[in-house]
Image (cartoon, rainbow, N blue to C red):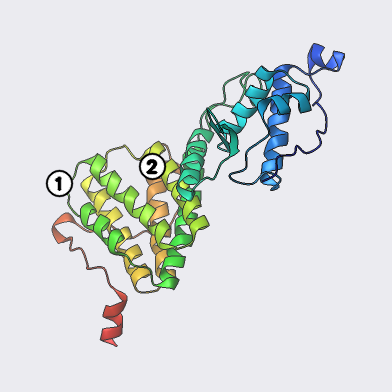
Amino acid sequence: MSSDIPPDPGPASGKGAAAASGKPRPVERARSIAAFLQDSILSGHYRPGDRLPSEADLCAHFAVSRPTMREALGRLAANGLIRTRRGAGGGAFVARPSMQDSARHLATLVALSGLAARPGGDGAEAGGPAPDAAWPETLLGARVQLLMACARMAAMTGADIGFIRAQIDRQSDFALDDAAFHDACHRMHLAVCEASANALLCMLGQALVEAYHSRTGRGPVEPRERARYLAFHVRLANGIAGGRPQDTDAALTDLWHFEYERLPGAAETAPQAQVERPPRMRDLRIPPVQRLGDEDGAS
């Protein structure tokens, strides 16, 4: 544990009247202190589980009032870098985030990133940007690319696809309402990320899956669209089970184009690609998910 405080580089320059007097406003000083402490945490000066110096010591070191220091610590807490405890033995401690916590936090930030910045708000200039109309497309592309990476890892390591298959079985029930169908697709994509057996890749993939689901996972899905989702997902699962990463890439590429076409306003600019035609409902036969053992036995 490191309880000493790194040297303070000095107050950040202020704006307006504050800059003219050489004394930054409290909110700017709090921002600079928070950034300085964040750098100290990320550089390893304070490690997960370490207790930061007391509020009084921090105030004395940075020559600021308690409200300013509390604002700085509040910024660190809002970013998930520290957690505070009250009572004896309490204080501010560097957080030990789990991968699940990190994924949820990242998913929230990603989902909010496509919304309009408040004019004049923190981090936004007056007359800031309007909502990014291309954000769903951007999020879709990033999500599919990470799913591809996860599926390739799963295929190359012979991952178990039991839970993936269970969600495909749910999707094959055309009596499901739209919310339940979206949930089955969502859970299956989360399972593909987990099947990668790579904690960091899984965290990043699940964060984008969650963010995309929160922005798009509520619309109606027609029966013929469900059939196409099902066909793509069966191909994906078969590619993982058969150890064929090229097949998982192909299935997710086709899914990418299909989901792009379903985005609002994307019909006129959808990428031109030969995408698997959906079967007629009366002819739909869901092929069994091929397992590695089946191929070995056949040979």
The residue tagged 2 is 213
When asked about the image quadrant of residue 233, the answer is bottom left
Position of residue 290 in the picture relative to residue 21 (left or right): left
Position of residue 71 in the picture relative to residue 241 (left or right): right
Position of residue 221 in the picture relative to residue 31 (left or right): left
Number of marks drawn = 2
* Label 2 SS: helix
The residue tagged 1 is 175
Q: Residues within 10 Å of mark 2 (few under 14, many from 20)?
A: some
In this picture, is 94 found above or below 17? Answer: below
Which x, y percent locates residue 222?
Answer: 24, 44
| Foreground residue among 176 and 257 | 176
Position of residue 272 in the picture relative to residue 124 (left or right): left
Amino acid type of the residue tagged 2 in the rendering: His
* Label 1 SS: loop
Identified at 42% across, 47% down, the residue is 209
Identified at 64% across, 46% down, the residue is 47
- Mark 2 / mark 1, whichever is N-terminal: 1
Which x, y percent locates residue 281?
Answer: 17, 55
| Foreground residue among 267 and 207 | 207
Amino acid type of the residue tagged 1 in the rendering: Ala
Which x, y percent locates residue 253?
Answer: 43, 59
